[in-house]
Amino acid sequence: MWRKFLAGRYGMDNLTLVLVFVSVILLNVNYVWIAGVGLLGYSIFRVTSRNIDKRRRELQSFDKATAGIRKLLIPVSEAIARGLISLYKAAVNYKTRFQQRKNFVFVKCTKCKNTLRLPRNKGKLAATCPVCKSEFTIKT
């Protein structure tokens, strides 16, 4: 049913998403919620519009107007993504360490601070770091 209704209509784009986001924020503000309802109505109009050329021109105008802001935000969003990825890797690393804690001990190299995994309960071991090749002894 919805596919039939939306056939030949414009659909969602970045401008519509921004309009919906701003309207949701405005709906929570006293006396300004009317503007939020108006923006929400306009975004629904854009999604269901059959005048695709006009909606594309509006999107191009929006893209030109926000190009500078997006240039500033792209490095920020990439930095946030890198941070989230490193947090995920740290969580996975912690999980594997936690699972292997009975059989292995994890120590840091004295020179390069790289983490080494050594077998547990083997007494004194002479460990060699695979990164910096420094040798040190450690009691496991």
Image (spheres, rainbow, N blue to C red):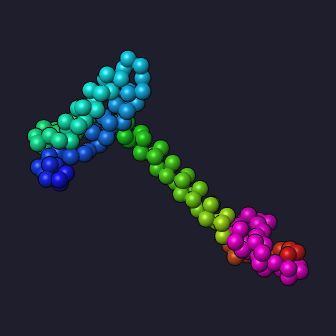
Q: Where is residue 99 in the image (x, y as percent from the top left)?
A: 70, 71
Q: In which quarter of the image is the C terminus?
A: bottom right
For residue 138, which quarter of the picture?
bottom right
Vertical comparison of 113 with 135: above or below:
above
For residue 25, which quarter of the picture?
top left
- Give yes or no for residue 122 being in the magenta stretch: yes
| 92 sits to left or right of 13 | right
Which residue is painted at 61% across and 65% down in the image? 92
Q: Decide if residue 60 is in sight here.
A: no
Which residue is painted at 46% across and 50% down in the image? 78
- Between 64 and 57, the one lying in front of the other is 57
Residues in magenta, as a range: 97-126
Vertical comparison of 47 with 99: above or below:
above
- Give yes or no for residue 49 being in the magenta stretch: no
Q: Where is residue 105 in the image (x, y as percent from the top left)?
A: 78, 73
Q: Decide if residue 71 is in sight here.
A: yes
